[in-house]
């Protein structure tokens, strides 16, 4: 009976880009984008820019936005920005590694 109503939710998502260096090594750059998910948790849209900036009209809103970003970045596994596609799903981070261990893991994967 007309247009079907679709509910979407949004959250921040850690993403990365990979650049091949002249020496053959890969250089990773991490940032945060917004993702929009359908009622089944599948990706339906995302921001064009891979790097969102926290904002707020007052200092407290800026802090709230930064905390929101950090919560989401800690909860979900990073994905390559160029691999985002409609219908994909995301994985929750499996461990509670300290940030130093996480960074060490990423650098180990570069070898």
Image (tube, rainbow, N blue to C red):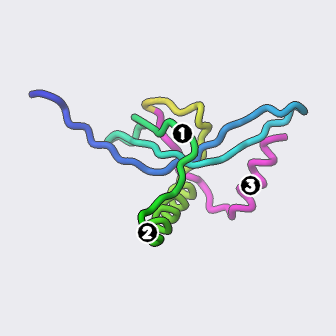
Please report the bounds of the magenta region as a residue range. Answer: 88-111
Q: Secondary structure at mark 1?
A: loop
Q: Are the two marked residues, 3 and 1, in contact with CB atoms closer than 8 angstroms?
A: no
Q: Which residue is mark 2?
A: 58
Q: Secondary structure at mark 3?
A: helix
Residues packed near mark 3 inside 10 Å, few (<14), some (14 to 19) or many (20 plus): few
Q: Nearer the viewer, mark 2 or mark 1?
A: 2
Q: Residue at x 73, y 42 (%)?
A: 28
The mark that comes first in sequence, 2 or 1, is: 1
Q: Residue at x 53, y 48 (%)?
A: 52
Does residue 97 sit above or below 40 in this rendering?
A: below
Foreground residue among 79 and 28: 28
Residue that sits furthest to the top in the current view: 2
Q: Residue 56: percent from the left, percent from the top?
A: 44, 62
Q: Which residue is mark 1?
A: 49
Q: Secondary structure at mark 2?
A: loop
Give the numbered dot on residue 103: 3
Mark-to-mark CA distance, 2 and 1: 24 Å
Foreground residue among 33 and 91: 33
* Residue 102 placement, left or right of 2: right
* Residue 52 placement, left or right of 98: left
On-image quarter of the N terminus: top left
Q: Are the two marked residues, 2 and 1, in contact with CB atoms closer than 8 angstroms?
A: no
Q: Nearer the viewer, mark 3 or mark 1?
A: 1
Q: Residue 6: percent from the left, percent from the top?
A: 25, 37
């Amino acid at each position: 009976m007309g247009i079907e109503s679709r509910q979407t939710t949004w959250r921040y998502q850690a993403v990365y880009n990979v650049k091949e260096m002249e020496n053959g090594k890969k250089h990773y750059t991490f940032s945060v984008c917004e993702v929009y998910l359908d009622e089944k948790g599948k990706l339906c849209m995302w921001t064009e820019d891979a790097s969102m900036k926290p904002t707020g009209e007052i200092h407290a809103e800026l802090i709230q936005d930064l905390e929101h970003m950090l919560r989401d970045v800690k909860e979900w596994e990073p994905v390559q920005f160029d691999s985002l596609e409609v219908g994909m799903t995301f994985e929750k981070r499996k461990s509670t590694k300290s940030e130093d261990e996480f960074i060490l893991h990423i650098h180990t994967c570069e070898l």
